Image (tube, helix red, strand yellow):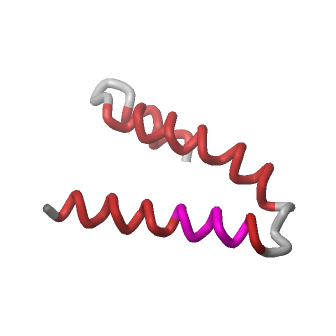
Amino acid sequence: MALFGRVTTGTKTFIELLRSVWRGPFWWAVPLIVLLLPLTIVFVILHAIPLVSPFVYTVF
């Protein structure tokens, strides 16, 4: 249940970010979001693989 709460919180935050970009004067953030979102997904997937995760930590 705690995982579900974290996922819904993250989803709400992401939706709020998209709403503020769409309604407000934050059009400069669109390329940033387009670039960072796929990178985030790739790092989360790589972090889930036990053999690859130590190398992900060395990037940062």
x, y (%) of residue 59? 56, 40
Q: Residue at x 43, y 60 (%)?
A: 11
Q: Which residue, as the protein is rendered here, is positioned at the far left?
A: 1
Q: Is residue 46 shown above or below 57? A: above
Where, by quadrant of the figure, is residue 44 drawn?
top left
Q: Position of residue 7 (x, y in %)?
A: 33, 58
Quarter where residue 46 is shown: top left
Quadrant of image for the N terminus: bottom left
Q: Position of residue 18 (x, y in %)?
A: 64, 62
Tally of marks: 0
Please state which of residues 56 and 42 is positioned toward the viewer in this rendering: 42
As drawn, 55 above or below 57: above
The quadrant holding residue 20 is bottom right
**Can you name the residue that lies furthest to the front here?**
23
Look at the image and say whether residue 22 sits in the magenta stretch: no
Q: Residue at x 76, y 72 (%)?
A: 23
| Residue 38 coordinates in the image, percent (x, y) | 60, 38
State the residue at coordinates (77%, 54%).
30
Q: Which residues are magenta?
A: 14-21
Q: Main secondary structure of the magenta part?
A: helix
Q: Which residue is outermost to the top?
A: 51
- Indicate whether 40 appears above or below 30: above
Q: Is residue 9 above or below residue 34?
A: below
What residue lies at 37% left-to-right and 68% top-to-bottom?
9
